[in-house]
Amino acid sequence: MLIKLLLAIVITLLFYVRHKVGFKMKIFFHPLLLAPALGWLLSPSVLGVSEGSFSAGIIIGVLTELLWGSNLVDFTAGLQYGLLTSLLSVSLVALTANINLLFPLSLVVLLLYSWQETVASYFSEKKWYIYLMGVFNFLILLGAPLVEKILGWLPAEILGNITVAEGLIPAVALGFIFVQGIFPVFKRDNIWYYAYLLAVLMTTVLMINDEPWAVFFFPLVWYSIYYLWNQTKEVKFKKYFRYSLAVIVVITAALFLKFDSSYITTNVQYVLWAESLVALFAVLRFLKLTAIEGYFIMILLSIIGSKIGMFI
């Protein structure tokens, strides 16, 4: 009970501080930075909550940053609680003995989006809202034993099929970023936002490939790109930054995804499959697919694909 209360307080304080600091300081309040940090804090070498918390923090931090981190830079629509999503998910994974990663993450996504569209839409401007949010966070963490029981009821095969999606979900975000590079949303058509996306791509591709130290590149690359542009203030560079997003997505897609298939026997086939998955979600993005919808569609595809032997 005490550890859950402390976690709820810490998570709520981080949410509050992020809301109060200036926009250039908000860079340090992103899932990519804080989720691994919380995972490390919950690891056996520190608080001893759960084995594997640090690696879970890295995976959750990467996935939530890719899918919803941009809403922390410039919110337009969708889930605006990306940081809370990552921190609560890492905590739930640790409190449920790291049985499964995506089930707690999915649960938190649904709960926070429901909260956002109901309670937050009416009371987020109230001074006492932060206390209400703290209670909500605490209640989610109190539900850890129930989540663990549900995980125990689910067949191991289903949990294994869900786990396959961990390596495929980045395709959703890559498809969305590709579209943003080709046909930008006007509100987000600015250097600060493009510098953010470039920093995310450069950092997460390294972290996904077992280079956790790359997390320190995130603020460095973000600030550096923006600083370099600020020295020239050439508007035409904005177009180059935007197009570079699409190019990087195409070139590195296969490095972001981690999956096996009985239909893939060569590296060329693997690359083509990766590009096809990214292209699929780019097309769906044109059809107004949201990140949450894409996230759950990919989990469903992973389960079905595993059942028919497409994914192993």
Image (tube, rainbow, N blue to C red):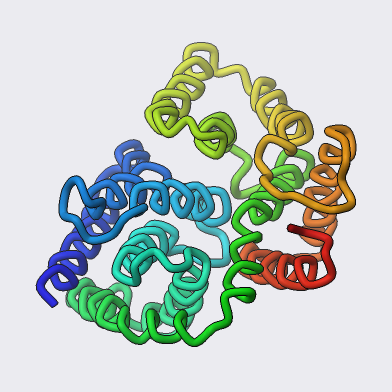
Identify the residue at horizontal 36%, vertical 51% (top origin).
Answer: 35
Q: Is residue 235 left or right of residue 81?
A: right
Q: Is residue 266 left or right of residue 113?
A: right
Front residue of 191 and 234: 191
Q: Hey, which residue is sitting farthest left in the picture? A: 2
In which quadrant of the rendered view does residue 299 lie?
bottom right
Instruction: Using the image, determine if residue 202 lies above or below residue 258.
Output: above
Where is residue 166 drawn, in percent x and y? 60, 56
Instruction: Using the image, determine if residue 120 lies above or below residue 6.
Output: below
Q: Is residue 122 visible?
A: yes
Identify the residue at horizontal 35%, vertical 86% (top origin).
Answer: 146
Quadrant for the C terminus, please.
bottom right
Q: Is residue 96 left or right of residue 234?
A: left
Q: Hey, which residue is sitting farthest top in the picture? A: 232
Q: Is residue 211 left or right of residue 238?
A: left
Identify the residue at horizontal 45%, vertical 82% (top origin).
Answer: 152
Front residue of 268 and 113: 268
Instruction: Using the image, determine if residue 283 lies above or below residue 199.
Output: below
Front residue of 69 and 216: 216
Front residue of 144 and 8: 144
In which quadrant of the rendered view does residue 308 lie?
bottom right
Identify the residue at horizontal 19%, vertical 45% (top origin).
Answer: 45
Where is residue 233 drawn, in percent x and y? 55, 18
Quadrant for the N terminus, please.
bottom left
In which quadrant of the rendered view does residue 293 lie?
bottom right
Where is residue 265 drawn, in percent x and y? 88, 41
Where is residue 136 drawn, in percent x and y? 28, 80
